[in-house]
Every structure is written in C-alpha cells, then in structure tokens.
C-alpha cells in the first residue's frame, strides 16, 4: 500500500474523470462519471454529486482500493466554478485537502507544465486561458453554447447540421456529409434528426458528438467537412491570439496548444489554428503533454509537497499513453 495517495479530477461538460496516483508518480486507477457543468440548472447539483461519486468509485475499483480510502490531496479542475461547485467537491471527495480550481488551469498545465503560455480548451464548449511571467491571467470565450463556444465540438456539429439542411433544401450543392451525420446518429432522414433534437431527446453532449462524424468525413476528403474544421481552427486560433495579446506575450516564445476532444480532429483544424497563431504571434504551437486529468494529478502532488519536475513529467507521460481515451 503506498504511503500517500492523491487524486486528480477533471470535471468536463460531457464527462468527469478521477485518477489516483501515489507520491512516486505511479498512476493506479482511473474512473469516469457524467457531466460536471451547468450546476445552476434544475438537477445540476445532484448531477455533479453523482458524476463525482461515479468517477471516484470507478477509480477506487480500478486501483483495487477499498471504498473507505482517503487521499492526502484531491485537486479538481472543474469546467464550472463557483462556491456551490467547491462546496459539493469538499463534501463528496474523501481527502484531507480538497483544492478546487477552474479546468483552464489544469488545461494550461498540459501545455506549459506551469510555465507562462496559453491554452485553448475545445471540447463540448470552448475557452482560451493564459498566464504570463508575472502570474497575471486572462480568459477569452467560455460564453456557452448559445452565446459563444466557437470552434467547439458543439459548434462544429451545428455548422455541419446547418450545411446538411441547406443541402437538403437545395440552397447549396448536395454533400455526403449528411449521410455521415445520419449514420452517426443511426437515423435515416434529417426530419427524424430534427424531431429528436427539437423534442429535447438529445443532450448538448450528444449533439456535440456529431463533430466526430465531421472529422471522419474530413479524413475521407469531404470538402464541406474540411471547410468546417478549418473555420473551427481559425476561431480557436483567434482566441489564443487575443489571450496572448491581453497578457503582453504575443512576441514571446511561449507555448500554446489545444486540449479537449477537438484536439483529436484531423489536420485541417490544426493547420488553420497554427496559421492563425503564427500570423500574429511568436508563440510555439505544441501538443498537450498529457490529458487534463494527469495535469490535475501533477497539481495535486505539488499541493501534497511532492517535487514535480521533468523526471516526474516523463514518468507520468509514459503511463498516460496507456490510459483509456
């Protein structure tokens, strides 16, 4: 039994992940729960509690640890902040010390490992965040699915659905992106999909999942899919550029990158992102070193007084490659 255990939590708009590690940097168990956002919606607090419980219990089972195991530190990077989120995390997590922060901070750690730089989180939603050498921070985006979230999976899905409806009407040339979207949802017509969406049978996360079909179509050369992903990349790149400008880092050789599900999109998105960043800044575009839940573990280890440096990052990086997606 390890002398001391820590837990990192990544609370996202679609899933919540909990990862257990010891102070030697051994990753012991991963658990997954539901969404952790929109805490102020009806049923939001109960949903967050259940998501945390499912993730923690899954991690304990994965690590073959007893249900009453306690942790030295649990660090939570949560997509939605506020006093209520912190209160629920404090109540639900079995740790001597519970630290609740915004997931923008754990995301930035994926890219810079604590150094100055910027990150764009593009999952179901989108937001950019950065920190300069003075410790000053700035955020751009994060306005939610009705007012913003440009370049996110949900936004990509909406662009694709709009292309499909315009093609169906004959307002633009036909596209086989429609077939890719319908196949993804297991439906045979846009009318059936229309009914599912407007009746409220589909959650935002389910709608956003259509972004994967857009990526698949782009990999096969579908022109509208490629165009949509390029637009998404430019939107995300602009967010990163504005964060760097706000922090006076646009002419510094800091690291910038994308984390979240959209980071798995094919090259058209990444090429557009890089082009937009390189056009206006001297930043270096890099891939995330490890998933956000591993960043949360690193930050939990730091909170527990464990030195975290290159050797630890390499150790965690090697193990992170074996974690389930």
Image (tube, helix red, strand yellow):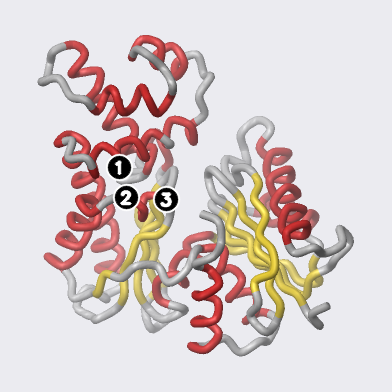
Q: Residues within 10 Å of mark 1 (few under 14, many from 20)?
A: many
Mark 2 touches mark 3? (CB < 8 Å): no
- Quarter location, residue 150: top left
Q: Position of residue 141 (x, y in %)?
A: 36, 51
Q: Which SS class for mark 3? A: helix
Q: Which quarter of the rendering shows the N terminus?
A: bottom right
In percent of the image, x 28 and y 61: which residue is there?
Answer: 240
In percent of the image, x 73 and y 38: which residue is there?
Answer: 46
Residue under pointer 1: 215
Q: Position of residue 124 (x, y in %)?
A: 44, 43
- Between the C-alphas of marks 2 and 1, the distance is 6 Å
Mark 2 touches mark 1? (CB < 8 Å): yes
Q: Which SS class for mark 2? A: loop
Is residue 65 left or right of 11 when viewed as pictured?
right
Seen from the viewer's position, the closer of residues 187 and 160 is 187
Earlier sequence position, callout 2 versus callout 1: 1
Residue under pointer 2: 265
Q: Position of residue 219 (x, y in %)?
A: 24, 44
Residue under pointer 3: 261
| Circle on res. 174 | none
51 shown above or below 195 = below
Q: Which SS class for mark 1? A: helix
In percent of the image, x 21 and y 14: which residue is there?
Answer: 168
Earlier sequence position, callout 1 versus callout 3: 1
Seen from the viewer's position, the closer of residues 222 and 37 is 222
- Between the C-alphas of marks 1 and 3, the distance is 11 Å
């Amino acid at each position: 039994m390890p002398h001391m255990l820590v837990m990192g939590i990544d609370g996202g708009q679609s899933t919540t992940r909990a990862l257990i590690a010891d102070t030697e940097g051994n990753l012991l168990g991963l658990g997954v729960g539901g969404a952790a956002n929109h805490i102020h919606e009806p049923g939001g607090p109960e949903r967050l509690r259940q998501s945390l419980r499912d993730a923690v219990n899954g991690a304990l089972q994965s690590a073959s640890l007893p249900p009453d195991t306690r942790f030295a530190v649990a660090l939570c990077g949560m997509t939605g902040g506020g006093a209520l989120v912190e209160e629920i995390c404090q109540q639900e997590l079995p740790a001597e010390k519970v630290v609740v922060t915004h997931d923008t901070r754990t995301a930035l750690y994926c890219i810079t490992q604590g150094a100055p730089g910027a990150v764009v989180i593009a999952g179901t939603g989108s937001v950019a965040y950065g920190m300069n050498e003075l410790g000053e921070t700035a955020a751009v985006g994060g306005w939610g699915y009705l007012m913003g979230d440009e370049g996110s999976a949900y936004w990509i899905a909406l662009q694709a659905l709009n292309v499909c409806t315009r093609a169906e009407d004959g307002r633009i040339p036909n596209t086989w992106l429609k077939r890719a979207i319908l196949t993804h949802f297991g439906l045979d017509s846009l009318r059936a999909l229309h009914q599912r969406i407007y009746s409220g049978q589909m959650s935002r996360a389910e709608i956003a999942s259509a972004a994967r079909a857009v990526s698949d179509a782009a990999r096969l050369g579908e022109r509208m899919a490629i165009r949509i992903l390029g637009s998404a990349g430019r939107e995300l790149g602009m967010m990163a550029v504005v964060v760097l400008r706000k922090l006076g880092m646009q002419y510094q050789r800091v690291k910038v990158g994308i984390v979240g599900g959209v980071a798995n999109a094919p090259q058209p998105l990444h090429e557009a992102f890089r082009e937009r960043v390189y056009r206006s800044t001297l930043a270096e575009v890099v891939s995330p070193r490890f998933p956000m839940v591993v960043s949360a573990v690193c930050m939990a280890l730091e909170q527990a007084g464990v030195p975290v440096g290159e050797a630890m990052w390499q150790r965690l990086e090697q193990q992170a490659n074996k974690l389930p997606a």
